[in-house]
Amino acid sequence: MVGKTVAGFFTNLAKNWILKPLATVFSVIFMYSFHALVKASPGRAFQLMKKISSTYYTPPREWAGFISSYMEQMTGGKIDLDEIIEAGAGGSGRRAMELLGEKFLQPMLAMIMPETPI
């Protein structure tokens, strides 16, 4: 019992007094560095942000396959992999959103507003 308390104390100490301040310092350094890059070379900064955005928000083909099969199970409709990849993680494709609306949102709206057709 005492071992868990001591381990928890040191873990908490490392997280709150070492890791969080380091993350804050590095975040501030990177923010100012990027702002300097924007001022010095706006074109290069735009290319860098475009690359970062595509890395974070464009799912790989394998992940898009998982999303596609999940949405098919949820909605019962087919969703194209290329549509998911093109839309990225934020969009998930127009067809996916339409199927989701047809399957879940219209029946929910019909519960609130009974005159709404399903």
Image (tube, grey):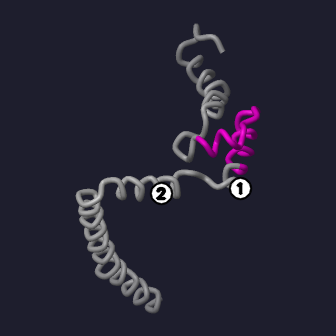
Q: Position of residue 55 (x, y in %)?
A: 52, 58
Residue visible at 65% across and 24% down in the picture: 102
Q: Position of residue 17 (x, y in %)?
A: 29, 80
Is residue 63 found left or right of 50 in the rendered image?
Answer: right
| Amino acid at the residue labelled 2 | Lys
The mark lying in front, picked from 2 and 1, is 2
Tell which circle, 2 or 1, labels the residue nearer the N-terminal end: 2
| Amino acid at the residue labelled 1 | Glu
41 versus 97 height, above or below: below
- The stretch of residues the image draws in magenta is 65-86
Mark 2: few, some, or many residues within 10 Å (few <14, many ≥20)? Answer: few
**Residue closest to the eye, 32 or 109:** 32
**Residue closest to the eye, 4 or 50:** 50
- Label 2: which secondary element: helix
Count of number-bearing discs: 2
Q: Which residue bears the numbered disc 2?
A: 51
Residue visible at 69% across and 53% down in the picture: 61
Q: Which residue bears the numbered disc 1?
A: 62
93 versus 29 height, above or below: above
Q: Position of residue 4 (x, y in %)?
A: 46, 87
Residue visible at 35% across and 78% down in the picture: 19
Residue visible at 37% across and 85% down in the picture: 9
